[in-house]
Amino acid sequence: MKKGHLLTAYILIGLGSYFLIKQLHLSLFSSFYGWPTILIIIGISFLLHSYVVNDNGHLFAGVLLIGSGVHLHGLENYAFWYDHWSVYMLIVGLAYIALFFKSKKGLIPALILLSISLIMIFSITLPDWFSGVYWLIDFIDTFWPVMLIALGIYFLMKK
């Protein structure tokens, strides 16, 4: 089989297995009968393809899909699951970390995204003497879209 068709094969095998298990009504997997599981399957296919072919092109997308699928599955099935926009930033940061370990690229965006997301996730439990941090967190929480636009314009202008 050509390496170009491996990704398609992995996705078809994964989705076929998912729908077969769903059609057989196996109670062991009943909590996984949702569309987030399809994201996880496609993400695993991307990661598997990336490692088998030794190409980093699908690594980032694979981690994003798996992370998003796991997060959405957690939101649907677990009452304790944390629902905040910073979780998506954490997933993107983890995708950059995975890319960095494979290609040695993307460490700076990974550290920035992971730092901001972890500060935002744990900002609820910071001690009172972090009042300056609370102001910064409120500022980021209010103006993060503007910061993304500014960062995008910076990258457009950068040579």
Image: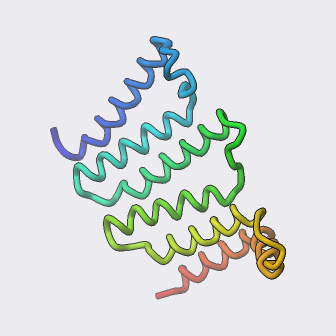
Quadrant in which residue 77 is drawn: top right
Pick whichever, 86 or 27, lies toward us: 27
Residue at image x 53%, y 61%? 92
Residue at image x 49%, y 61%? 94
Where residue 23 appears, as percent x and y from the top left, is: 47, 13
User: Does 110 sit above or below residue 44?
Assistant: below
Where residue 98 appears, as percent x and y from the top left, is: 40, 61
Quadrant in which residue 129 is drawn: bottom right
With 85 as the anchor, is 55 left or right in this view? left
Pick whichever, 107 or 153, lies toward us: 107
Pick whichever, 66 or 58, lies toward us: 66
Question: Can you say which quadrant of the picture contains the N terminus?
Answer: top left
Residue at image x 33%, y 29%? 13
| Number of residue marks | 0
Residue farthest to the top, as pictured = 24
Residue farthest to the bottom, as pictured = 159
Q: How is the image coloured?
A: rainbow
Where residue 116 appears, as percent x and y from the top left, is: 64, 71
User: Does 84 sit above or below residue 73?
Assistant: below
With 153 as the anchor, is 97 left or right in this view? left
Residue at image x 45%, y 65%? 96
